[in-house]
Amino acid sequence: MIPLLVCDDSAMARKQLIRALPAEWPVSITQATQGEEALAAIRQGLGRVVLLDLTMPVMDGYQVLAQLRAEGLSCKVVVVSGDVQEEAMRRVQELGALGFIKKPAPAEEVRATLQRLGLLDLEPPLAPTAPRPELALKVNFRDALREVSNVAMGRAAALLAQVLGTFVRLPIPQVNIFEVSELHMALLDAQRGQRLSAVCQGFIGDAIAGEALLLFHDLEIGAIANLLGWQPQNETETSEMLLDLASILTGACLSGIAEQIDVRFSQGHPQLLGQHSAIEQLIRLNRERWKNTLAVEISYSLEGHAVHFDLLLLFTEDSLSRLTKKIYYLMEQE
């Protein structure tokens, strides 16, 4: 049996990936939820082949690859990630990864990649057997939505990286249910004492509705303009720049989520809520609708630049039932 290590902080991602493995591949599977766990397993000989995520807490995939090289640990690594930036693929190859599979990983692509790399031929194949016991993974709603958001976030980051010509550092998305007062506090915390410009864009589809809120820190807008090669001459041109960038980022992220849960979102026109008072305005206008709000928080940052974007996807209380059904249906398919 081939010792196979599957490393991903998402139970849903691990479940999906294990199910996508060729049934006849003779592997004994060990799971890890972050890089330090993965390294410990590899040192114990439990990872002759490693399927490795990139965006994880404690130690990410890049750090794992670097440590494998530093310690001279021998294993064959295939990265399986939602971070689909071209620079991410280049970096993991430089660090020694043999291949790269984009999330969510279709079974046919997993098989083709393993076949191309000669990993299916490490030992003679077995006859198909009963489902592997490792598939009995418990996946909760928040973990599933976080993984869906992670994949969508990665696609949006790849587009953002192309537009800005720089590498985008990805966070681990946060999924929380807020009362309106808690949401207010979370948004104020995102403000971090700085003046903000906020772009809000409504979306709706299949009884799921909400607002995508993108927060720009005013002190960073000049750096964003430089990256775009655009020098706004007045507030109107600055507003146009922020609206265009928000449309790209939120549109790509919403599209990624919609594709995974089989929904088609209609998006409203992005609106600039102004500066400094934007948070108060947003809360005041939506206090009744957002009594109980599901919030997905994503904070992108740009490597080598003091620039980050806080993106919040805020789903209305009325949307929670339908969104939950969609996510659970997706979990059953995975």
Image (cartoon, rainbow, N blue to C red):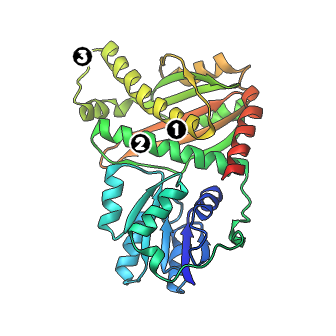
Alpha-carbon span between mark 2 and mark 3: 28 Å
Q: Which residue is under mark 1?
A: 256
Between disc 1 and disc 2, whose residue precedes?
2
> Where 90 falls versus 180 (above or below)?
below
The label on residue 233 is 3
Q: Where is residue 65 in the image (x, y as percent from the top left)?
A: 40, 70
Residue at x-position 36% and y-position 84%: 72
Q: How crowded is mark 2: few (under 14 residues within 10 Å), some or many (20 or more)?
A: many
Q: Where is residue 240 in the image (x, y as percent from the top left)?
A: 35, 18
Nearer the camera: disc 2 or disc 3: 2
Q: Position of residue 110 (x, y in %)?
A: 49, 61
Name the kind of residue labelled 1 in the image: Gly
Mark closest to the chain's N terminus, 2 or 3: 2
Left or right side of 178 for 61: left
What kind of residue is marked 2? Ala
Report which residue position mark 2 lands on: 157
Residue 281's x, y, as percent? 58, 18
Contact? badges 1 and 3 (CB < 8 Å): no
Say if 318 sits above or below 303 in the image: above
Secondary structure of the residue carrying tag 3 is loop
Mark 2 residue element: helix
* Label 1 vs label 2, nearer the camera: 1
